Amino acid sequence: MTRIPISALLGLLFTAAFFLAAILAPWLSPYGMAEVVGDVWEPMSPTHWLGTDSIGRDLLSRMIWGGRVTIFVAVCATLIAFLTGVVLGFLAAVAGGWVDQALSRLVDLMMSIPALIFALVILSVMPTTLPILIMVMGLIESTRVFRLSRAVAIDIEVMDYVEAARLRGEGNLWIITREILPNALSPLVAEAGLRFIFMVLFISTLSFLGLGVQPPLADWGGIVKENKDGIVYGIPAALLPAVAIATLAISVNLVADWILNRTSSLKGGRG
Amino acid sequence: MTDLLEIRNLKIGATSYPPGEPPREVTLVHGLSLTLAKGRVMGLIGESGAGKSTIGLAAMAYGRGGAQITGGEVLLNGIDILQSGPAGLRALRGKRVTYVAQSAAAAFNPSRRLMHQVIETTLAAGVPLAEAEARAVALFRKLGLPNPETIGRRYPHQVSGGQLQRVMTAMALCPGPELVVFDEPTTALDVTTQIDVLAAIKEAIRDTGVAALYITHDLAVVAQVADEIMVLRNGRMVECGETSQIIHSPREAYTSDLVSVRQKDHPAKPPGTTALLSIRGVTARYPGVPVDVLKGITLDLAPGQTLAVVGESGSGKSTLARAITGLLPPSQGEIFFDGRALPPKLAGRSPDDLRELQMIYQMADTAMNPRQTVGTIIGRPLQFYFGLRGAEKRKRILELLEEIELGAGFADRYPAELSGGQKQRVCIARALAAKPRLILCDEVTSALDPLVADGILKLLLDLQREEGVAYLFITHDLATVRAIADQIAVMYRGKVVRSGPKAEVLAPPFDDYTDLLLSSAPEMRQGWLEEVIAHRKMAAGGN
């Protein structure tokens, strides 16, 4: 194995810490998520490490629970984006012809509408529950994944080994899962890391605008929204979730970058 | 005579990154020495990996793709250029020592006019524009390029491959260098084009009195241009001597292998009475291109025989293979296999049709899925066509590996862990696994070194004897044709211009194209090039 560079190690460490905190939230957080335990915007103290929020809830507990919501939504939406994007992208590449045309033009159409506005419009007419939120985010982002996986698959589809499989009489299912997928995996894995980050930013933006996760549940974007008025009085409660979003984004990016570097050399060694 | 170039104890190393293993240092050239006098041409010859290009570039103090010169001296006119520093090297490269690359199409900037690129280094050397252009035009004329006055105004895509290679030679000669490094300048060209380029290069070298290193893997080519030849293997010198000595009385066994490798002749089988494959009036074109690539092809192939389809690039021979396999359904004509008409489209063919007709590709690298082991690659047709599983499948895989002369240990390797020849053998095994009656071989030996290619041809002949499989063998190389064919079809611009048993096709009287093709294939003797050129000039004058 090649040695892990220090930047990737740092990224792995922080990513792992965030995910662990999200999974272990019920045991880690000192107070309940919606429990009012103190005054409004108390400063940091031994009882409330990060202080309290706009209505006196423990900020550390809310950050941990909020991270859980943020990461859960982002992971689920990324999975949906990849499932639909990769399947349809590969299908378009392998089938070609009118299937490819129809899918690609539909994706063009969807991508021509700015993602955030598209999401806002849909969410303003639909009930904003978590499943719907995840579906909307996943489907909008799947257009980006579709483009990437179609491009990657088209490059692989013209290789002689795929032609050899066709001449053998293999069906599309075999060609997609056995010939194309294993060779497309490395760019897709790296893309997954980046997509996950976009999802985190996406859900945070939606929540900040009030169309994302609904109270009493909160994610980091929601916590920023609730505490944004405090900034005027010099209260850092709104900045902490912002820092968390930035840290998570950078650390996942570092890991994705490393994966991309490591795997791109396998594709013929051109680096 | 003074020595222009002297290389002393040159060592070149690089870091290799084998998949799944820690990087390690490898030595590419192990302490090589050579001397080259002014105005002489030395041929560097060897198989891939012999270090010939690496040594050629070292004459410019350059290491490509991570190769580093780790020791020794490269003296140009007695001065060690390895010590001359970046500024010294800039003054040297492209001016006193120049380079001609293998693929001219990849070496030219597609968005700048030829003249601009040809005189670039000449201008950098301080020659005035008008004089540089005059020099370039003179070189274009000497190299036999059409319209020497105006060809410089064209873009690279507006001239043919052979012409582009000559323009690059002009580029190398324009600054008036002392040494030119030719790195396989004719390898990517058709034989009929190669001969013109070769003659032009030879004449230009002679007239300008420049010294040259001529790198190639083809001994017959280098015998035409070089005064002396150095044979290389694995970064070491095998032998070095005058051209006539190397080709007539080689001292080392490896050299005599190289000399004799292209001179095998396979006794043709008598023509068969029944036809396994018969192609009747097949015409085909690619969708969206209003030109017929195949024009009324009619051919027959008897069971257990080899039909060689010969032609230069663009003659439609690979398209013929696509039409037979069903990847490109013909617009007219029919293809019969074993007496029954094959459905034109791949989708319409039965599993048995597919099984009996297998294909082997030119580039074994891209013909195998890099994420599958050799066992999976060979095992899939066994499972797909015969439903073999588990131990039974494993047993058959090992049998097949035995047949292609690789051991059982190869079953769990990945393609990246195989050499070029081994990869091609695995592809042969994959085709054989289907128990086919016909295998289409598309330039299967073109990407391989001569000795390795020889092994593959021998294997194919052995397998034909044992399994009775027929081959449709597509190639541009006449030496390969002689070594394997029973029947020959010569293709030119989408038509079969000549076909029949090998002895008949290769014996006079010839039609014009076959004559051109046969006389263009380099022969392993000095003076062959001059003879052919003189003969052609006479023939042209007589008309």
Image (spheres, coloured by chain):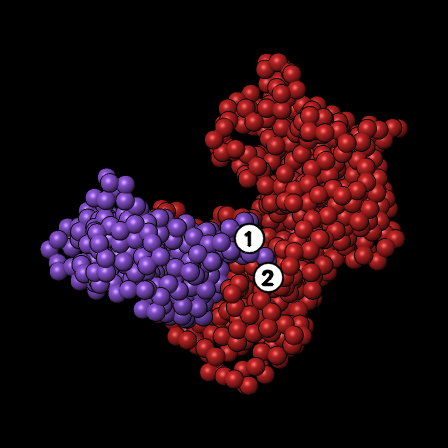
Chain colours: A purple, B red
Q: Nearer the viewer, residue B521 or B80?
A: B80
Report the residue marked by disc 2: A1
> Chain letter of disc 1?
A
Note whether B248 is above or below B177 in the view shown.
below
The residue depicted at 60 percent of the width and 36 percent of the height is B165
Relative placement, left or right, of A54 versus B25 is left
Q: Nearer the viewer, residue B63 or A60?
A: A60
x, y percent for residue A5: 55, 53
Note whether B174 is above or below B490 in the view shown.
above
Cα distance between the residues tagged 2 and 1 = 12 Å
Number of the label disc, if any, that sits on residue A5:
1
x, y percent for residue B197: 64, 37
The residue depicted at 58 percent of the width and 64 percent of the height is B415
The residue depicted at 51 percent of the width and 26 percent of the height is B113
Q: Nearer the viewer, residue B265 or B8?
A: B8
> Chain letter of disc 2?
A
Number of the label disc, if any, that sits on residue B99:
none
Q: Nearer the viewer, residue B327 or B532?
A: B327
Q: Are marks 2 and 1 on the same chain?
A: yes
